Structures are given as structure tokens and as C-alpha cells.
Image (spheres, rainbow, N blue to C red):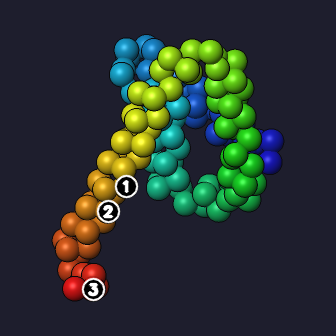
């Protein structure tokens, strides 16, 4: 389990190094995730080996939101100034993301030849 977690962090580190050396606008963790996905596509047995560790990590993913909550509380006085625009941006981007995902799903299904079962 420790080795697998180290593998995740190692790919994040590689991503950070590549992002800084190559001056990429893509965040290092995203690059690391892409590299890890490529490895898992090339070597599926590694995916089976890290499946239990990844599942355990995902089951506790909500703990990663604690620092964000602490940041909101720490800067609560500034939230009164920018709270409304921030809330509008979060709600608006969420609605747009859901809409874009739904449209993408619809067009991918059409491309695959899957019949749309939307009631008329």
C-alpha cells in the first residue's frame, strides 16, 4: 500500500518537474495523472495491483476538502466583499459544466449509434 501511494506521489512529482522545466501551462498533477493513465493503459496489470489502494484513497477523498474549508473560514472577512460574485461564478460554472457534459454525452451516443430515449 505504501509503495502504491508512493507511485501516485511519484507521478505527481514527475508531472510537477515536467511542468516547470518545460514551462507548461498545464498543472503538474494533471500531467502526472495523464502519465499514470498512459502507464495503466500500457500495463493493465499495474492497475489491478493498485486497485485496492486507489479505492481506499478515493473513499477518503472528502478529507482533501478540509483545507479549502479552513481557507474560507480564515478569509471570511474578504468573503463578505467577494462572496456574491464568487457564488455566481461557482453556480454558473457548475450549470455550464453539467450542460456541456450532457451535450457531450448526447453527441457521443449519437456518434456511437445509440438511440436517444428522451421522452417527448
Dot 1 or dot 3: first in sequence order is 1
Residue visible at 80% across and 42% down in the picture:
2
Q: Position of residue 38 (x, y in %)?
A: 45, 47
The residue depicted at 45 percent of the width and 15 percent of the height is: 20
- Residue closer to the observer: 104 or 36: 104
Q: Residues within 10 Å of mark 2 (few under 14, many from 20)?
A: few
Q: Would you place residue 107 above or below residue 20 in this image? A: below
Mark 2, secondary structure of its residue: helix
Q: Residues within 10 Å of mark 1 (few under 14, many from 20)?
A: few
Res. 102 mark:
2
Q: Which disc is residue 107 wearing?
A: none
Between label 2 and label 3, give the one nearer the viewer. Answer: 3
Q: Residues within 10 Å of mark 3 (few under 14, many from 20)?
A: few
Separation of marks 1 and 3 at Cα, in angstroms: 20 Å
Discs 2, 1 touching: Cβ within 8 Å: yes
Residue 84: name its quadrant.
Answer: top left
Q: Quadrant of residue 93?
A: top left
Residue 102 screen position, x and y as percent: 32, 62
Q: Quadrant of the C terminus?
A: bottom left
Circle 3 is placed at which residue position?
119
- Residue 74 in view (yes/no): yes
| Disc 1: which residue | 98
Amino acid at each position: 500500500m505504501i509503495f502504491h501511494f508512493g507511485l501516485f506521489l511519484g507521478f505527481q512529482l514527475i508531472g510537477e518537474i515536467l511542468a516547470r522545466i518545460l514551462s507548461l501551462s498545464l498543472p503538474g498533477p494533471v500531467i502526472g495523472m495523464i502519465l499514470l493513465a498512459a502507464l495503466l493503459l500500457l500495463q493493465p496489470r499495474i492497475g489491478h495491483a493498485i486497485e485496492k489502494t486507489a479505492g481506499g484513497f478515493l473513499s477518503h477523498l472528502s478529507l482533501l476538502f478540509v483545507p479549502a474549508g479552513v481557507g474560507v473560514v480564515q478569509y471570511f472577512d474578504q468573503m463578505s466583499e467577494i462572496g456574491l460574485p464568487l457564488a455566481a461564478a461557482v453556480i454558473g460554472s457548475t450549470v455550464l459544466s453539467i450542460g456541456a457534459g450532457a451535450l457531450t454525452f448526447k453527441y457521443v451516443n449519437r456518434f456511437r449509434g445509440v438511440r436517444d430515449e428522451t421522452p417527448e
